[in-house]
Image (cartoon, rainbow, N blue to C red):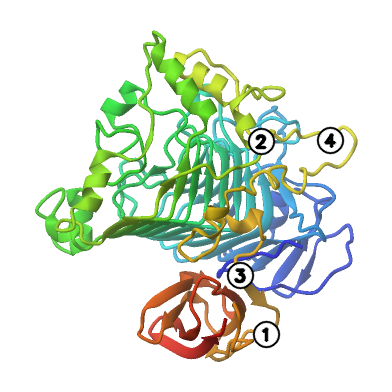
Amino acid sequence: MIKIFTAVLLMMFFAFITLSNQSFAQGGTLDVFANGPTLDVVIGSDTTSNGEQAHSVYRLVSLDTTYIFDATITIKSSVSIIGVLGPDDRPPCIQPDVLGDGSVPGVLFTFTGDGNQFILKDLYLLGIAINNTVNYGAGQAVQISSDNIRLIVDNVIFENWSQFAIGYAGNWDKFYIYNSKFRNMTTQPNQWYVGELLRNENYIGAFPTDTIIIKYNTMLCVSGYATAATGGIVNYYEFSHNNIVYTFKNPFFLDRMVNAKFNDNIFYGVYAGGQNYTEYNGGWDSFTAGTVASIITMGPLDSLTAALLLGHPSTGAGDPAAEALRNVEVKNNAYYWSDGLTSFWTAWNDTAHVDSIITPVFMNSQTINMFADNAQWPGFVESGNLNVDPGFGTSINAVLNPGTGNNVGLLNWFTVVRTGTGTTELYGYQLTNVDFSSGNWVPDWPLPESSDLQYSNASLQTGATDGGYVGDPYWFTGVTGVERVPGHVPNEFTLYDAYPNPFNPSTTIRFSIPESGNVSLKVYTVTGQEVMTLIDNEYTINGSYDVSVNMINLSSGVYFYTLTQNNIFLTKKMILLK
């Protein structure tokens, strides 16, 4: 059974229920079934006189058919929308209906109301309508439309959302995206810059962002960006333990964050579309015109962002005082472009194409120089990044070549995009086909890529900064080693003795937190050297957690582990005996 993993695991809600044909309430929870009114009707009508939701939790319990929506579900009070997993860990699925005029609704959820918190957990959000069509003009799973919203996404499949999985139009919002899969978010050839995981929707960068953490996720065949923050300040950004596989454009339109980590990711076949010279000279893929295609792209802060960071007017773009406050680390990432892709690029540029391509690199010269200049950017650290083939299964590289139906393959899609001859072609990984002809329908499960994303490169399986898998560990283990303990909410901040203790080489650490918030759990030597980061300032729902610790790569001896939340910390001792 795949266990849901990460330090933001939510509460294990409620006991098993007997299915019926009606939705019914359990206190603050409404159980919703798929064979009743459409989901937008159920949730939209469940409101109080002031327009807020009458329930704080909506549980989707049907697995034998999909939930349908006819219109955007707009919610303006804090809610959780939780799926009840099946015995094979199948999540319930939501998809668009076909409206009376033949159109397909675009946005699934709009979350609004300053300061609210929204949780999406254990769901399959499918952008393909019941007649197997997609809204290519406005397909979007989640829209954030207010300030200081906290969005938590845990174990959610996003598939075929042609615009964005998540778009936001608010100031100082916070995003915690864990354990999720973004697949086949490709679009038609005249829209090759969309199909994005997270998008700041003010394209001149006026929306500042508080926090973005994207961890333990996979993006497979997504045309556009993992994150586009378009110039607005981002106080903290973390992108760790993710697989990014066969994107067409650059994974990040984001280069002027204040504090950031890009660690332990696999970038495979990303930026497959490269840059043409219009994009290069116009700064389409970064904030600096004439910047070479690059997976990791950094640039100096503009004057407005520098002033926000300093708290007073800056001296202009690249203000040394502001740059000295930035902290960015890029560690232990693997990146690779397959022979099938690189040979195609070579042949393309050797032919008399007007639209020749600048092919991508891991870091361009501007970025390399920033990491090398310790005087100007003392907080920039880069190490352990390797150009190495992870060894995915054969079906992953099959993305390059034609599939079935309208799946023309990535190389043909590249051709019609770059020659301007495309119409409705798509590329993707084993595109989902919706078929209600024989009655109820649900997407294939488990995901068809499950086996072939288990890569064979042994060095990467222990090559992360935490000693674990580089990339998304889900495809190997299904867990990160952090698991919620079922039970009541604790009333004390507690760190328990490791068990077993002494141990060789694995042990378990349990902790409890009475209030939700950012938590860190780290391991130190007796001299105070940090040797393992088990939880790194991650937003964690109140409750008790077990953390599996494997210290096979460390020497025998005494170690200390410290739990921190806000200004509270607890430390205990453990002994590794080999």
Q: Disc 3 or 2, which lies upstream in sequence? A: 2
Q: Residue at x 52, y 37 (%)?
A: 195
In this picture, residue 511 sits left or right of residue 260: right
In space, the residues marked 4 and 1 are separated at their CA atoms by: 42 Å
Which residue carries the number 3 mark? 481
Q: Disc 2 or 1, which lies upstream in sequence? A: 2
SS type, badge 1: loop
SS type, badge 4: loop
Q: Which image quarter holds the N terminus?
A: bottom right
Q: Nearer the viewer, mark 3 or mark 1?
A: 3
**Tag shown at residue 254:** none
- Badge 3: how crowded within 10 Å, few (<14), some, or many (20+)? some
Where is residue 292 drawn, in percent x and y?
A: 30, 33
Q: Which image quarter holds the C terminus?
A: bottom right
Which residue carries the number 2 mark? 394
Where is residue 538 drawn, in percent x and y?
A: 48, 69
- Whether 424 is drawn above or below 382: the answer is above
SS type, badge 3: loop
Which residue carries the number 4 mark? 436
Residue furthest toward the front? 578
Q: Disc 4 or 1, which lies upstream in sequence? A: 4
- Whether 256 is drawn above or below 402: the answer is below
Q: Are marks 2 and 4 in contact (CB under 8 Å)?
A: no
Q: Residue at x 58, y 67 (%)?
A: 6
In space, the residues marked 3 and 2 are separated at their CA atoms by: 29 Å
Kind of residue sitting beneath label 2: Thr
Where is residue 318 drawn, in percent x and y?
A: 16, 50
Which residue carries the number 1 mark? 488
Q: Nearer the viewer, mark 2 or mark 1?
A: 2
Kind of residue sitting beneath label 4: Phe
Kind of residue sitting beneath label 1: His
SS type, badge 2: helix
